[in-house]
Amino acid sequence: MSADSYRRRVNTINKVIAGLQRIGIVFGPMQMLTVHGRRTGRLLTFPIAVNELDGRRYIVQAFPKAAWVANARAADTVTLTRGRKAATARLIEVPVDERRPLLRELVAMSPASVGNRFVTTGLSDSPTPDGVAAAADRIALFRVEPA
């Protein structure tokens, strides 16, 4: 599957996830990330997976040039919504050297599709835990902290 067709498929699934979240149905690690646009100032909302790694919560970039990444870098705070519960949070970008073990853990504890996603989207050359960890300089990773 090409990166473009994969992206279209994910966008379709994200619309379903957003609709379910709005009516209070949640599943897996999915939450809605709301952040002010860095250029427009408008509130933008993205379905996002919040993963627990090493006892903390993290959000990992899944696509190159993801708009939420640039907006999160520019924002002081974001809102994370799960079903009908919302909380303000700070997203702290993890330095590249600290990302490697976290990305390795994420891929090692997840289904193979997680590692494959990084390859399909062009962020990693290999779907293995070590392969994704080696691509840490291309994969943004944010720690979720209370605001």
Image (cartoon, grey):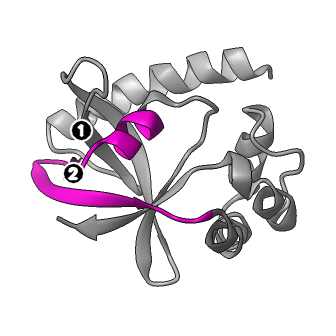
Q: Is residue 135 left or right of residue 77?
A: right
Considering only vertical position in the picture, is 2 above or below 58? above
Residue 34 at what x, y percent from top left? 24, 38
In the figure, is residue 26 to the left or right of 138?
Answer: left
- Can you give x and y, in whole percent of width and height, for residue 140 in the image? 57, 50
144 magenta-colored: no
Identify the magenta region. 68-95
Q: Which residue is mark 1?
A: 34
Q: Which residue is mark 2?
A: 77
Q: Is residue 9 left or right of residue 57?
A: right
Q: Secondary structure at mark 2?
A: loop
Residue 46 bears which disc, if any? none
Q: Residues within 10 Å of mark 1 (few under 14, many from 20)?
A: many
Point 44% across, 84% down: residue = 55
Residue at (44%, 35%) from the top-left corner? 70
Q: Amino acid at mark 2?
A: Thr
Residue 47 picture location, percent across and down: 37, 37
